[in-house]
Image (spheres, helix red, strand yellow):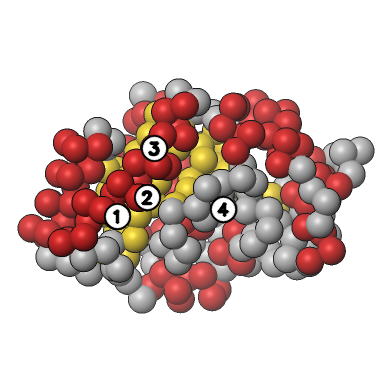
Amino acid sequence: MAVIVMTGRGGAGKTTTTANLSTYLAMREYRVLAIDGDLYLPNLGFHFGMDNVKYTVHSLLHDPSINPEWAIYKHRETGVYVMPGSTNLHDVVGISPQKLRDLVEEIKYKFGIVFVDSPTGVPFDTLPTFEVADYQIIVVEIERSPIYSFETMVENEVQKLKALGDEYGLKIGVVLNKVRESADVVDKIIEAIEEDIGVPVLSWVPFDEAVPESINVGIPVLAYKPKSDSALAFAEAGEVLESWIFG
């Protein structure tokens, strides 16, 4: 099974969500691979402390003769297998999103679940990968989404991203992230998404200083501070996703 994680705006916590959903399922003893599909601005490796490795997803896209296993690294603290991207500008030139799709198709059968961290906005890097995906997680940042303008934000962000998943027949869910609002405001937002847009909300994750701390040490917050508010919320989202995929 393959899951594409995406968002409409930078800074929403898409990669943080990818890292923590991967962590949740790995800690449940599933064999999980997280791939950095943000080919031009990759940063998934930072979340796992893997920002200086020999082989990356870019290595594979440039040279198909390289064994994909060489670019996969097991994160000691979480058990997640990670295929990081390269932050070297030279490596991102001349790569093909179609090759990423072929790579995901080739390797996803070796894992219980594969997460693809997609670029922000219209995901040109990962668009061909939708053909071989099964699920789509849309990450919505609530911190910068006041309730009075939420309807417009939904139309401009969630609905457009949902349309991509619908086009490819994916099962779609939403994670609300960096939430500072009160519970009654969040409830209204969830109602708007689930009833007006028709997409289930897996969980809402509160703004939590433990998250940037965890990124700095290269351990997703679910493993770094498992009792923190954000970790508990990511675990809730992971539990829903687990039930979708594995019953």
Q: For the residue marked with disc 4, what is the amino acid?
A: Pro
**Alpha carbon of mark 4 to alpha carbon of mark 1: how far?**
19 Å
**Alpha carbon of mark 1 to alpha carbon of mark 2: how far?**
6 Å
Q: Position of residue 191 (x, y in %)?
A: 15, 44
- Mark 3 falls on what kind of element? helix
| Residue 216, above or below 64 | below
Residue corresponding to mark 3 = 162
Position of the N terminus, as image quadrant, is top right
Residue corresponding to mark 1 = 153
Q: Residue furthest left?
A: 184
Q: Nearer the viewer, residue 144 or 105?
A: 144
Residue corresponding to mark 4 = 119
Q: For the residue marked with disc 3, what is the amino acid?
A: Lys
Q: Nearer the viewer, residue 155 or 83?
A: 155
Residue name at image x 89 percent, y 44 percent? 63
Mark sitting on residue 157: 2
Q: Position of residue 118 (x, y in %)?
A: 56, 49
Cβ atoms at labels 1 and 3 below 8 Å apart: no
Cβ atoms at labels 4 and 1 below 8 Å apart: no
Residue name at image x 55 percent, y 73 percent? 217
**Alpha carbon of mark 2 to alpha carbon of mark 4: how far?**
14 Å
Q: For the residue marked with disc 2, what is the amino acid?
A: Glu
Q: Quick one: label 4 or label 1, which is nearer the N terminus?
A: 4
Question: Nearer the observer, disc 4 or disc 1?
Answer: 1
Q: Quick one: label 4 or label 3, which is nearer the N terminus?
A: 4
Residue 246, by quadrant, is top left
